[in-house]
Structure formats: structure tokens, C-alpha cells
């Protein structure tokens, strides 16, 4: 892994997200720094980026405050529109409209696979940073699968 190249890609991604700009080509650059296993690599890059986003007033332990801060940060970085589907102390399930990875891709030929592992990683990194707990996120349903107009994610927050 070329850590120096990866750090540069993450720095540029962060700045472009703050400005509401596209980061697609930067994700490709991050791939060159990491290797070939696409989903795992995109998750890792997303997680690294999410963990580098500054979070004030952390760590937060109350699930409603975690969600409020999570939504605030995703709006600030233009990561899409989040609607909470389900929550408890151990997880947050939400759907995301305008997902950065797939919003511009056609759904005319539905895919069997999830595509937005980068966002899952970003969301895990952000919530991990907010809660100070090692989190994991997964895309449950992707807009590109043709069954819905949004992507759905779950973030698992471990109990102490």
C-alpha cells in the first residue's frame, strides 16, 4: 500500500466533499494506492475518510444525539439525504437518497450486488468517531439493484 498517495487522496476527498463537489476520480486514485479488492478497498478508504472528519463535542453515547450529529456531519459533507428507518442502542438503519457513488448510474439493468461500500465505510468511520466505539456499517440494499429509489445502510454500534 502506498500510504502517502492514500493520504493525499483522502485529503482531496475531504475538501471536495465540503465544497459539494464530485470525488469519483479520487476514489479511483485511492484504488491505485491500495490494490484490487474493490468493495473491501472502497470500504477501507471510506472508513479512513470518515474517521478523519472532525467531530466536535464527542464522544457521544446517547443514540439520539449520535444520530443528530451523524446527520449534521453528512449534510455538512454533502453525503446525501438520510432518513432514519430504525434505531436502538446497538444499531442505526437508514436509507440514503442521492448516494454519492451511485446517484448518476443508470438502473436500467439491475445489479445483484451492492455498490456503495465506500459510503458504508464513511458512515462507519463517522459514527465511530462520534461514539468512540469501533463500528461497522453495511449496505443492505442498493438503488442499483432496481428495487428501490435509494440505498439502505445499517451501522452496528457495539455495546460496552
Image (cartoon, rainbow, N blue to C red):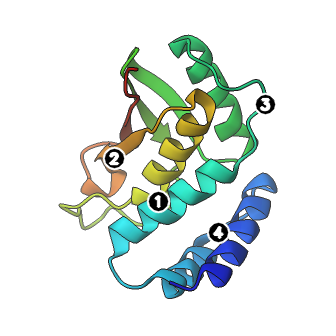
Q: Earlier in the sequence, mark 3 or mark 2?
A: 3
Element marked by disc 2: strand
Q: Which mark is residue 139?
A: 2
Residue 69 falls left or right of residue 48? right
Q: Quickly name the residue at label 1.
A: 118
Q: CA distance from mark 2 to mark 4?
A: 19 Å
Comparing 21 with 67, the one in front is 67
Q: Earlier in the sequence, mark 1 or mark 3?
A: 3
Residue at 36% x, 39% y: name it. Answer: 152
Residue 120 visible from this viewpoint: yes
Mark before the other along the chain sequence, 2 or 1:
1
How far apart are the alpha carbons under marks 3 and 2?
A: 26 Å
Q: Which of labels 3 and 2 is toward the front?
A: 3
Could you tell whether 45 is left or right of 6 in the image?
left
| 75 lies left or right of 37 | right
Q: Which residue is mark 4?
A: 23
Question: For the residues marked 1 and 4, what is the alpha-carbon distance in whole angstroms?
Answer: 11 Å
Circles 4 and 3, Cβ within 8 Å, touching? The answer is no
Vertical arrangement, residue 82 with respect to residue 102, above or below: above
Q: Nearer the viewer, mark 1 or mark 4?
A: 1
Q: Earlier in the sequence, mark 2 or mark 4?
A: 4
* Mark 3 lies on residue: 56
Amino acid at each position: 500500500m502506498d500510504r502517502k498517495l492514500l493520504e493525499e487522496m483522502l485529503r482531496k476527498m475531504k475538501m471536495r466533499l465540503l465544497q459539494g463537489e464530485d470525488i469519483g476520480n479520487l476514489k479511483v486514485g485511492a484504488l491505485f494506492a491500495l490494490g484490487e479488492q474493490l468493495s473491501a478497498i472502497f470500504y477501507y478508504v471510506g472508513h479512513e475518510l470518515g474517521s478523519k472528519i472532525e467531530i466536535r463535542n464527542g464522544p457521544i453515547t446517547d443514540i439520539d444525539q449520535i444520530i443528530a450529529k451523524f446527520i449534521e456531519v453528512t449534510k455538512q459533507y454533502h453525503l446525501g439525504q438520510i432518513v432514519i428507518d430504525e434505531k436502538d442502542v446497538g444499531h442505526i438503519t437508514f436509507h440514503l437518497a442521492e448516494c454519492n457513488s451511485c446517484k448518476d448510474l443508470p438502473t436500467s439493468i439491475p445489479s445483484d450486488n451492492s455498490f456503495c461500500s465506500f459510503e458504508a465505510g464513511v458512515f462507519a468511520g463517522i459514527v465511530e468517531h462520534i461514539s468512540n466505539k469501533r463500528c461497522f456499517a453495511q449496505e443492505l440494499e442498493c438503488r442499483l439493484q432496481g428495487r428501490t429509489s435509494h440505498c439502505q445502510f445499517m451501522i452496528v454500534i457495539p455495546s460496552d
